[in-house]
Image (tube, grey):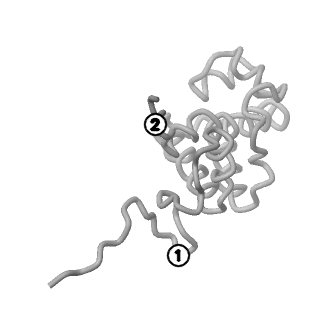
């Protein structure tokens, strides 16, 4: 029997969280700023078809980012800056990572990880940040003398 390797949290983020964030941004840009899907696609670096799916809740619907209160200031700033042509693709990447980190800190990605791989034991996961804002990538080693 071949064991399947576990999806890394960043893989889950790429498949679920990032589309959800882009969906929230795309909907805000089209609804509040009246931008066309093609314009939004250029701003987000995706296709017009992707934006169409974001705005129709066909893609990025696994998580409603607009309900994550802590992410709202970053999302609002991102949408405003994109709509006004004041954000580079590098700054956008940074904002996506910040919102993803907020989602991870809230424990919202744990559910997505469990959905993506039923063999994941979230109680054993040491990757996402804890309440004290530290990321546990490796278990702390006991000091030996």
Question: Where is 129 relative to 31, above or below?
Answer: below
Can you name the residue that lies furthest to the front here? 1
Provide the secondary structure element on which disc 1 rests.
loop
Label 2: few (<14), some (14–19) or many (≥20) C-alpha neighbours in 10 Å:
few
- Looking at the picture, how far across and down is residue 43, in whole percent? 61, 28
Provide the secondary structure element on which disc 2 rests.
loop
- Looking at the picture, how far across and down is residue 137, in whole percent? 40, 59
Instruction: State the residue at coordinates (64%, 43%).
Output: 118
Q: Which of labels 2 and 1 is toward the front?
A: 2
Q: Name the residue under label 2.
A: 5
Image quarter hosting the C terminus: bottom left
Instruction: State the residue at coordinates (64%, 54%).
Output: 103
Give the mark nearest the N terminus, 2 or 1. Answer: 2
- Count of numbered tags: 2
Closest to the observer, 62 or 55: 62
- Looking at the picture, how far across and down is residue 119, in whole percent? 59, 45
Residue 106 falls in which quadrant of the image?
Answer: bottom right
Q: Can residue 84 be seen in this view?
A: no
Question: Where is 66 relative to 145, above or below?
Answer: above
Distance, label 2 to label 1, CA atoms, is 29 Å
Instruction: State the residue at coordinates (57%, 41%).
Output: 13
Q: Mark 1 points at which residue?
A: 132
Label 1: few (<14), some (14–19) or many (≥20) C-alpha neighbours in 10 Å:
few
Instruction: Report if the CB atoms under discs 2 and 1 are less than 8 Å apart.
Output: no
């Amino acid at each position: 029997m071949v064991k399947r390797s576990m999806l890394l949290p960043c893989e889950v983020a790429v498949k679920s969280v990032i589309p959800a964030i882009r969906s929230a941004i795309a909907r805000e840009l089209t609804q509040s700023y009246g931008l066309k899907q093609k314009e939004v696609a250029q701003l987000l670096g995706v296709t017009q078809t992707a934006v169409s799916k974001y705005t129709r809740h066909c893609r990025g619907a696994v998580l409603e980012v607009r309900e994550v209160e802590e992410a709202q200031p970053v999302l609002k700033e991102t949408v405003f800056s994109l709509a006004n042509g004041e954000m580079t693709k590098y700054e956008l990447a940074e904002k996506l990572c910040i919102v993803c980190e907020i989602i991870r800190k809230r424990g919202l990605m744990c559910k997505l990880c469990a959905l993506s791989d039923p063999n994941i034991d979230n109680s054993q996961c040491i990757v996402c940040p804890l309440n004290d804002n530290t990321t546990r990538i490796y278990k702390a080693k006991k000091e030996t003398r």
